[in-house]
Amino acid sequence: FRVGMTPNAAFEAVNHGHEVIIEAGAGIGAGFEDADYVQAGATIIAAASEIFASADMIVKVKEPQAVERKMLREGQILFTYLHLAPDADQTNDLIASGATCIAYETVTDRAGGLPLLAPMSEVAGRLAPQVGAWTLQKANGGRGVLMGGVPGVGPARVVVIGGGVVGTHAARIAAGMGADVTVLDRSLPRLRYLDDIYGGTFKTSYASAGNTIELAREADMIIGAVLIPGAAAPKLISRAQLSELKPGAVLVDVAIDQGGCFETSKATTHQDPIYEVDGIMHYCVANMPGAVARTSTIALGNATMPFMLALADKGWKKACADDPHLKAGLNVHAGQLTYAAVAEALGMTAITADEAIAG
């Protein structure tokens, strides 16, 4: 439902002297009509194949589908989420295309954050307790527990694994719904920060393996919110451990785009979002922010716009050479991997981004 460029972003690109072409109907899912893009100065093209054939840079949201990957060509820039670490097929196709592929999720900032992943992490984190609460309902296979409880009946117990952007937003919303929330993380400085800022809102605990399963046993909902930038997510709860959880407990795996952080996770869709394994309900939608497409599109567009304009204005080589944070987003160039964590996850070799720029 999301679209990679808002009318405002198109307007900015046109004002920078670039031609912007938009697939017909691309923005409808996010509430943008073709007329909005025309008013911004863009041209509407009927078929995606025409755009791939003529555009110097393709701007998307999700990773390209197999049919789209076949349309990429040498010298073309692809700017989108890629999540290559768990996806060998996509990685091989992008390498074969010869295109220059820059991944939103590995672009960095001065604070060591991930500015193009953060907006969707904020959305997914805030959605996680909402969809988890729905899954907890008895009619959906859950335990039949209300997040905030009622007078005389205790609230749901929610464990959030990972105290980063996703985990923090998930914990805030779950606590706001009245749940008893604990956030687990392995970074003591991060736990101190969360305790200082949110001390009375939710609890914190160190994410040792023993502590994790101990808290999981008592949880009604477990939200997986771990991230290793560009790499596959670690598996934090095994299938064997499902038998130790409460029957009807809910696992919400926000890390599913990176392979998932529960051994029994498999990607699902908004149309068929949940499934059961050994009595435990799983919510593993791979495109969670798509449920609130307008909010997600605008938030992402605000974050990607400066980088998109830099790539268009300068070309990818100068833009990456001038900005080490954008350079960190380079994952594939001219038939070679350029991101070490992806290469390690897939058992492949990579050159450095600097070598790609110099080449």
Image (cartoon, helix red, strand yellow):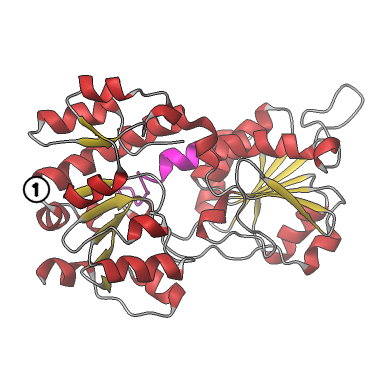
Is residue 116 within the magenta segment?
yes
Taking the spot 57% from the left edge, 44% from the top edge, the residue there is: 167
Choose top left, top right, bottom left or bottom right for residue 25.
top left
Instruction: Decide which of 32, 121 is in the foreground and name it.
Output: 32
**Magenta range:** 108-123
Residue type at mark 1 is: Lys
Residue 181 visible at all: yes
Image position, residue 27 (x, y; %):
37, 30
Taking the spot 84% from the left edge, 47% from the top edge, the residue there is: 248
Please give the count of numbered marks on the rendered protein: 1
Taking the spot 83% from the left edge, 56% from the top edge, the residue there is: 245
Image position, residue 104 (x, y; %):
34, 50
User: Does residue 137 appear to the left or right of 181 in the view shown?
Assistant: right
Give the crowd class for mark 1: few <14, some 14-19, many >=20 residues within 10 Å: few
Image position, residue 204 (x, y; %):
65, 46
Report helix, strand or loop for mark 1: helix
User: Does residue 291 appear to the left or right of 283 in the view shown?
Assistant: left
- Residue annotated with mark 1: 314
User: Does residue 31 appear to the left or right of 168 in the view shown?
Assistant: left
On screen, 186 above or below 132? below
Instruction: Decide which of 150, 130 is in the foreground and name it.
Output: 130
Taking the spot 92% from the left edge, 25% from the top edge, the residue there is: 152
Which quarter of the image is occupied by the C terminus?
Answer: bottom left
Residue 200 visible at all: no
